[in-house]
Amino acid sequence: MGILNVTPDSFWDGGRYRQVDAALAHGLQLIAEGADILDIGGESTRPGASTPGAGEELDRVIPVIEKLRQRSDIPISIDTCDAEVMQAAVAAGASMINDVSALGRPGALAAAVAAGVPVCLMHMQGDPQSMQRQPSYIDVVTEVRDFLVQRAAECMAAGLPRDCLILDPGFGFGKNLEHNLSLLRDLDVLVAAGFPVLVGLSRKSMLGKLLGRAAEDRLPGSLALAVAARQRGARIVRVHDVAATLDVFRTLDAVEDPRGTAGAGPEGHEQNSVSRTGVSE
Ligand code: 9MG
Protein backbone atom coordinates (compact mmCIF):
# COMPACT_ATOMS: atom_id res chain seq x y z
CA MET A 1 0.00 0.00 0.00
CA GLY A 2 1.57 3.25 -1.16
CA ILE A 3 1.01 6.39 0.93
CA LEU A 4 -0.23 9.56 -0.73
CA ASN A 5 -0.66 12.33 1.81
CA VAL A 6 -2.44 15.38 0.46
CA THR A 7 -1.79 17.34 3.63
CA PRO A 8 0.25 20.39 4.58
CA ASP A 9 1.62 18.82 7.76
CA SER A 10 2.30 15.05 7.56
CA PHE A 11 5.59 14.15 9.24
CA TRP A 12 7.43 12.93 6.14
CA ASP A 13 5.75 14.17 2.97
CA GLY A 14 3.60 16.99 4.39
CA GLY A 15 3.13 19.82 1.89
CA ARG A 16 4.79 18.05 -1.05
CA TYR A 17 1.61 16.90 -2.77
CA ARG A 18 -0.87 19.63 -1.89
CA GLN A 19 -1.42 20.62 -5.50
CA VAL A 20 -3.65 18.17 -7.36
CA ASP A 21 -1.17 17.74 -10.20
CA ALA A 22 1.71 16.98 -7.83
CA ALA A 23 -0.45 14.47 -5.94
CA LEU A 24 -1.57 12.84 -9.18
CA ALA A 25 2.01 12.57 -10.41
CA HIS A 26 3.14 11.02 -7.14
CA GLY A 27 0.20 8.58 -7.13
CA LEU A 28 1.06 7.50 -10.69
CA GLN A 29 4.69 7.13 -9.62
CA LEU A 30 3.70 4.82 -6.73
CA ILE A 31 1.58 2.78 -9.15
CA ALA A 32 4.49 2.52 -11.59
CA GLU A 33 6.69 1.36 -8.70
CA GLY A 34 4.28 -1.53 -8.11
CA ALA A 35 1.84 -0.43 -5.40
CA ASP A 36 -1.25 -2.65 -5.15
CA ILE A 37 -3.31 -0.07 -3.25
CA LEU A 38 -2.98 3.71 -2.84
CA ASP A 39 -3.90 5.19 0.54
CA ILE A 40 -4.94 8.82 0.11
CA GLY A 41 -5.26 11.04 3.15
CA GLY A 42 -6.19 14.69 3.66
CA GLU A 43 -5.80 14.84 7.44
CA SER A 44 -2.44 14.42 9.12
CA THR A 45 -2.42 11.88 11.96
CA ARG A 46 1.07 12.69 13.23
CA PRO A 47 1.29 13.38 16.99
CA GLY A 48 -0.02 16.86 17.79
CA ALA A 49 -1.65 17.38 14.39
CA SER A 50 -4.83 19.44 14.27
CA THR A 51 -8.02 18.33 12.52
CA PRO A 52 -9.11 20.17 9.37
CA GLY A 53 -12.86 20.51 8.87
CA ALA A 54 -14.54 17.92 6.65
CA GLY A 55 -14.88 20.60 3.96
CA GLU A 56 -11.14 21.15 3.78
CA GLU A 57 -10.43 17.43 3.85
CA LEU A 58 -12.87 16.91 0.98
CA ASP A 59 -11.24 19.72 -1.01
CA ARG A 60 -7.87 18.04 -0.58
CA VAL A 61 -8.72 14.43 -1.42
CA ILE A 62 -11.69 14.29 -3.79
CA PRO A 63 -10.04 15.95 -6.83
CA VAL A 64 -7.04 13.64 -6.42
CA ILE A 65 -9.21 10.53 -6.23
CA GLU A 66 -11.20 11.63 -9.28
CA LYS A 67 -8.09 12.34 -11.34
CA LEU A 68 -6.41 9.09 -10.34
CA ARG A 69 -9.59 7.17 -11.10
CA GLN A 70 -9.49 8.56 -14.66
CA ARG A 71 -5.93 7.31 -15.10
CA SER A 72 -5.80 3.99 -13.26
CA ASP A 73 -7.98 1.24 -11.84
CA ILE A 74 -5.72 0.67 -8.82
CA PRO A 75 -7.73 0.18 -5.60
CA ILE A 76 -7.81 3.49 -3.72
CA SER A 77 -8.10 3.56 0.06
CA ILE A 78 -9.38 6.72 1.72
CA ASP A 79 -7.47 7.50 4.90
CA THR A 80 -10.04 9.36 6.99
CA CYS A 81 -12.01 9.27 10.24
CA ASP A 82 -14.81 11.43 8.89
CA ALA A 83 -18.13 9.90 7.76
CA GLU A 84 -18.79 12.55 5.12
CA VAL A 85 -15.33 12.13 3.63
CA MET A 86 -15.75 8.33 3.55
CA GLN A 87 -19.02 8.66 1.69
CA ALA A 88 -17.74 11.21 -0.84
CA ALA A 89 -14.46 9.36 -1.42
CA VAL A 90 -16.22 6.08 -2.17
CA ALA A 91 -18.62 7.90 -4.51
CA ALA A 92 -15.54 9.37 -6.26
CA GLY A 93 -13.98 5.93 -6.74
CA ALA A 94 -12.28 4.83 -3.51
CA SER A 95 -12.83 1.16 -2.70
CA MET A 96 -11.44 0.90 0.83
CA ILE A 97 -11.59 2.92 4.05
CA ASN A 98 -8.56 3.30 6.32
CA ASP A 99 -9.71 4.73 9.64
CA VAL A 100 -7.12 5.30 12.37
CA SER A 101 -9.94 5.77 14.87
CA ALA A 102 -11.53 2.38 14.03
CA LEU A 103 -14.82 3.98 12.91
CA GLY A 104 -15.12 5.68 16.30
CA ARG A 105 -16.26 9.15 15.18
CA PRO A 106 -19.97 9.95 14.94
CA GLY A 107 -21.55 8.45 11.82
CA ALA A 108 -18.39 6.65 10.68
CA LEU A 109 -19.62 3.12 11.31
CA ALA A 110 -22.92 3.76 9.53
CA ALA A 111 -21.06 5.38 6.62
CA ALA A 112 -18.76 2.37 6.30
CA VAL A 113 -21.69 -0.06 6.38
CA ALA A 114 -23.44 1.97 3.68
CA ALA A 115 -20.26 2.13 1.58
CA GLY A 116 -19.90 -1.67 1.65
CA VAL A 117 -16.13 -1.61 1.08
CA PRO A 118 -13.24 -3.15 3.04
CA VAL A 119 -12.30 -1.20 6.16
CA CYS A 120 -9.05 -1.06 8.08
CA LEU A 121 -9.71 -0.68 11.82
CA MET A 122 -6.66 0.72 13.61
CA HIS A 123 -5.89 0.78 17.31
CA MET A 124 -4.99 4.12 18.90
CA GLN A 125 -4.69 5.00 22.57
CA GLY A 126 -5.96 8.57 23.02
CA ASP A 127 -6.08 10.96 20.06
CA PRO A 128 -3.39 12.48 17.80
CA GLN A 129 -3.20 15.62 19.99
CA SER A 130 -2.37 13.75 23.18
CA MET A 131 -1.52 10.14 22.33
CA GLN A 132 2.26 10.28 22.77
CA ARG A 133 2.19 12.07 26.16
CA GLN A 134 2.05 9.04 28.42
CA PRO A 135 0.95 5.87 26.64
CA SER A 136 0.33 3.15 29.19
CA TYR A 137 -0.58 -0.55 29.02
CA ILE A 138 -0.33 -3.55 31.31
CA ASP A 139 0.09 -5.93 28.36
CA VAL A 140 0.17 -4.00 25.10
CA VAL A 141 -0.05 -7.04 22.82
CA THR A 142 -3.19 -8.56 24.31
CA GLU A 143 -4.83 -5.18 24.98
CA VAL A 144 -4.43 -4.09 21.36
CA ARG A 145 -5.57 -7.49 20.07
CA ASP A 146 -8.60 -7.54 22.39
CA PHE A 147 -9.62 -4.01 21.44
CA LEU A 148 -9.44 -4.77 17.72
CA VAL A 149 -11.28 -8.08 17.97
CA GLN A 150 -14.01 -6.43 20.07
CA ARG A 151 -14.27 -3.53 17.62
CA ALA A 152 -14.47 -5.97 14.71
CA ALA A 153 -17.34 -7.76 16.50
CA GLU A 154 -19.16 -4.44 16.96
CA CYS A 155 -18.67 -3.59 13.29
CA MET A 156 -20.00 -6.99 12.22
CA ALA A 157 -23.00 -6.57 14.50
CA ALA A 158 -23.66 -3.24 12.79
CA GLY A 159 -23.60 -4.90 9.36
CA LEU A 160 -20.00 -4.92 8.09
CA PRO A 161 -19.21 -8.36 6.66
CA ARG A 162 -16.33 -10.16 8.39
CA ASP A 163 -14.41 -10.46 5.12
CA CYS A 164 -14.42 -6.67 4.76
CA LEU A 165 -12.40 -6.15 7.93
CA ILE A 166 -8.66 -5.57 8.21
CA LEU A 167 -6.95 -4.98 11.57
CA ASP A 168 -3.98 -2.73 12.34
CA PRO A 169 -2.15 -2.43 15.69
CA GLY A 170 -1.44 1.26 15.02
CA PHE A 171 2.31 1.57 15.44
CA GLY A 172 3.15 4.94 17.00
CA PHE A 173 -0.43 5.78 17.89
CA GLY A 174 -0.32 6.03 21.68
CA LYS A 175 2.68 3.70 21.98
CA ASN A 176 6.26 4.22 23.11
CA LEU A 177 9.25 2.44 21.56
CA GLU A 178 8.93 -0.60 23.82
CA HIS A 179 5.20 -0.89 23.06
CA ASN A 180 5.89 -0.71 19.31
CA LEU A 181 8.66 -3.30 19.45
CA SER A 182 6.51 -5.67 21.54
CA LEU A 183 3.61 -5.32 19.11
CA LEU A 184 5.84 -6.08 16.15
CA ARG A 185 7.71 -8.92 17.85
CA ASP A 186 4.39 -10.56 18.76
CA LEU A 187 2.42 -9.55 15.67
CA ASP A 188 1.48 -13.22 15.20
CA VAL A 189 -0.82 -12.85 18.23
CA LEU A 190 -2.93 -10.37 16.27
CA VAL A 191 -2.61 -12.37 13.03
CA ALA A 192 -4.00 -15.40 14.91
CA ALA A 193 -7.26 -13.51 15.46
CA GLY A 194 -8.05 -14.48 11.86
CA PHE A 195 -8.36 -11.11 10.10
CA PRO A 196 -5.90 -9.75 7.54
CA VAL A 197 -3.40 -7.47 9.29
CA LEU A 198 -2.15 -4.15 7.93
CA VAL A 199 0.90 -2.42 9.37
CA GLY A 200 2.23 1.11 9.02
CA LEU A 201 5.85 1.45 10.11
CA SER A 202 7.34 3.48 7.29
CA ARG A 203 9.84 6.14 8.48
CA LYS A 204 8.03 6.43 11.81
CA SER A 205 9.54 8.07 14.89
CA MET A 206 10.19 4.69 16.52
CA LEU A 207 13.08 4.50 14.03
CA GLY A 208 14.21 7.95 15.11
CA LYS A 209 14.29 6.72 18.71
CA LEU A 210 15.94 3.41 17.81
CA LEU A 211 18.58 4.70 15.39
CA GLY A 212 18.79 8.41 16.13
CA ARG A 213 18.00 9.21 12.50
CA ALA A 214 15.85 11.88 10.87
CA ALA A 215 12.87 10.80 8.73
CA GLU A 216 14.87 11.13 5.49
CA ASP A 217 17.44 8.61 6.74
CA ARG A 218 15.02 5.95 7.92
CA LEU A 219 14.58 3.86 4.75
CA PRO A 220 16.86 0.95 5.77
CA GLY A 221 15.15 0.75 9.16
CA SER A 222 11.72 0.92 7.51
CA LEU A 223 12.62 -1.97 5.21
CA ALA A 224 13.78 -4.06 8.17
CA LEU A 225 10.50 -3.40 9.98
CA ALA A 226 8.49 -4.27 6.85
CA VAL A 227 10.32 -7.59 6.60
CA ALA A 228 9.73 -8.32 10.29
CA ALA A 229 6.01 -7.62 9.83
CA ARG A 230 5.77 -9.76 6.71
CA GLN A 231 7.56 -12.65 8.43
CA ARG A 232 4.96 -12.53 11.19
CA GLY A 233 2.04 -12.62 8.79
CA ALA A 234 1.17 -9.00 7.93
CA ARG A 235 -0.77 -8.96 4.64
CA ILE A 236 -0.64 -5.26 3.81
CA VAL A 237 2.31 -2.99 4.45
CA ARG A 238 1.63 0.76 4.25
CA VAL A 239 4.79 2.46 2.95
CA HIS A 240 6.19 5.65 1.46
CA ASP A 241 8.87 3.74 -0.47
CA VAL A 242 7.04 1.27 -2.68
CA ALA A 243 9.87 0.40 -5.09
CA ALA A 244 12.40 -0.31 -2.36
CA THR A 245 9.92 -2.34 -0.31
CA LEU A 246 8.95 -4.43 -3.34
CA ASP A 247 12.59 -5.07 -4.20
CA VAL A 248 13.06 -6.48 -0.72
CA PHE A 249 9.87 -8.55 -0.85
CA ARG A 250 10.56 -9.89 -4.34
CA THR A 251 14.03 -10.91 -3.27
CA LEU A 252 12.61 -12.70 -0.24
CA ASP A 253 9.96 -14.34 -2.45
CA ALA A 254 12.69 -15.75 -4.68
CA VAL A 255 14.64 -17.10 -1.72
CA GLU A 256 11.61 -18.57 0.00
CA ASP A 257 9.95 -20.00 -3.12
CA PRO A 258 12.31 -20.98 -5.96
CA ARG A 259 9.33 -21.00 -8.37
CA GLY A 260 9.20 -17.24 -7.83
CA THR A 261 12.02 -16.76 -10.35
CA ALA A 262 10.48 -18.91 -13.14
CA GLY A 263 10.11 -16.82 -16.28
CA ALA A 264 12.68 -14.24 -15.28
CA GLY A 265 15.17 -13.37 -18.00
CA PRO A 266 18.54 -15.12 -18.36
CA GLU A 267 20.14 -12.61 -16.01
CA GLY A 268 17.18 -12.84 -13.66
CA HIS A 269 16.51 -9.11 -13.99
CA GLU A 270 12.88 -9.22 -15.08
CA GLN A 271 10.07 -8.69 -12.63
CA ASN A 272 7.27 -10.38 -14.51
CA SER A 273 6.75 -13.51 -12.51
CA VAL A 274 7.68 -12.79 -8.95
CA SER A 275 4.54 -12.49 -6.91
CA ARG A 276 3.81 -9.63 -4.54
CA THR A 277 3.26 -11.96 -1.63
CA GLY A 278 3.09 -9.97 1.56
CA VAL A 279 1.58 -6.91 -0.06
CA SER A 280 -1.82 -7.86 -1.31
CA GLU A 281 -2.32 -11.57 -1.82
C1 9MG B 1 -2.88 7.13 8.26
N1 9MG B 1 -1.89 6.30 8.95
C2 9MG B 1 -0.71 6.71 9.47
N2 9MG B 1 -0.09 5.68 10.05
C3 9MG B 1 -0.90 4.61 9.90
C4 9MG B 1 -0.83 3.27 10.30
O1 9MG B 1 0.19 2.82 11.01
N3 9MG B 1 -1.84 2.45 9.96
C5 9MG B 1 -2.91 2.91 9.27
N4 9MG B 1 -3.90 2.04 8.99
N5 9MG B 1 -3.05 4.17 8.87
C6 9MG B 1 -2.05 5.00 9.19
Image: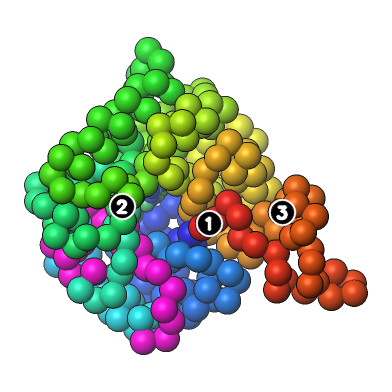
Residue 19, how many percent across, how many down? 36, 78
**Residue kind at label 1, given as amino acid type:** Glu
On residue 281, the disc is 1
Is residue 72 rendered magenta in the image?
yes
Q: Nearer the viewer, residue 183 or 133?
A: 183
Q: Which residues are magenta?
A: 70-90
Element on which disc 3 rests? helix
* Of the image marks 2 and 1, the number of the one nearer the N terminus: 2
Q: Nearer the viewer, residue 34 or 79?
A: 34
Q: Nearer the viewer, residue 86 or 14?
A: 86
Q: Tell me if label 2 and label 1 are in contact, CB under 8 Å.
A: no
**Residue kind at label 2, given as amino acid type:** Cys
Disc 3 target residue: 253
Quadrant location of residue 157? top left
Is residue 146 rendered magenta in the image?
no
Q: Nearer the viewer, residue 140 or 95?
A: 95
The structure residue drawn at horizontal position 90% and vertical position 74%, both measured from the top left corner, is 266
Residue 40 seen by the camera: no
On residue 164, the disc is 2
The structure residue drawn at horizontal position 27% and vertical position 60%, both measured from the top left corner, is 117
Q: Residue furthest right?
A: 266
User: Around disc 2, counting alpha carbons within 10 Å, would you say few (fewer than 14), some (14 to 19), or many (20 or more)?
Assistant: some
